[in-house]
Image: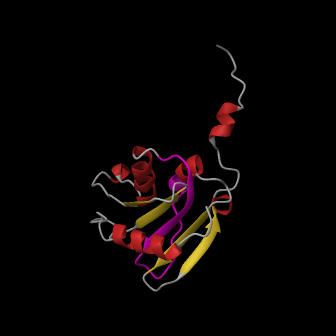
Amino acid sequence: MSEINWAALQQAAKQAAAQAYAPYSKFPVGVAILADSGKIYTGCNVENASYGGTVCAERNAIGAAVVAGERNFTALLVYTPQAMLTPPCGICRQVIAEFFTPDAPIASCNHLQQQQDWTLGELLPAAFTPTYLANSTKVGA
C-alpha cells in the first residue's frame, strides 16, 4: 500500500469518538485502522460500571476488522478531543502487536488538528508476538 490518507483516518476516528460510551471517565476515544485491503475500520471505547469490563477503542476497531475477515493492517490512528495527544494504552499495544508489524505507523490526533506519530516498535519494543509461540520448544508432554 502506498501513502496513508491520514485525513480520512482522522475523520473516521473522530466520527467513532462521537459514538463512545464513556459515562465514567468522560474520555471519549475513537480509532480508525487501515487494513492492507484499503478498507478503514473504526472503534470507540465502551465503558462499564464494573471498570474491568471496559473495552478500548483500539481493541473494538481491531475486533470489527477481524469479524470482517481482515488480519493484516497498515496504520492505526487514535482520536481524542483532548489537548494532550494520547497513544494506545498498554493492553491495546499488545493487541495491536498481534496484527501490525513493528514498523507500522501509529498516530494520535486531537480536535486541534495536531498529530503525533510513532511506530508500533517505538510504543512496544520487544513485543511478545505469535512468533514466540511458533518458535518455542515445548517442555514436557
112 and 49: which is toward the camera = 112
Residue 56 included in the magenta stretch of the image: no
| Residue 60: % across, % down | 40, 54
Left-right relation of 119 to 82? right
The residue segment tinted magenta is 70-93
- At x 69%, y 22%, the residue is 138
The residue sitting at 29% across, 54% down in the picture is 48
On the image, the x and y values in percent for residue 74 come to: 58, 59
**Direction from residue 60 to residue 37 in the image, left or right:** right
Quarter of the image for residue 21 reads bottom left
Quarter that holds the N terminus: bottom right
Residue occupying the far bottom of the picture = 112
Please provide percent x and percent y for residue 130.
Answer: 63, 39
Q: Nearer the viewer, residue 130 or 52?
A: 130
Q: Quadrant of the C terminus?
A: top right
Q: Position of residue 98 (x, y in %)?
A: 57, 46
59 vs 86, nearest the viewer: 59
With respect to residue 64, does 27 lie above or below? below
Residue sitting farthest toward the top: 141
Residue at x 48%, y 68% (from the top left corner): 78
Above or below residue 49? Residue 16 is below
Model colouring: secondary structure
Looking at the rendering, which quadrant does residue 80 occupy?
Answer: bottom left
Up the image or down, 27 lies above or below 92; here it is: below
Q: Is 125 located above or below residue 87 in the figure?
A: above
Q: How many marks?
A: 0
**In this orientation, which residue lies closer to the viewer: 99 or 127?**
99
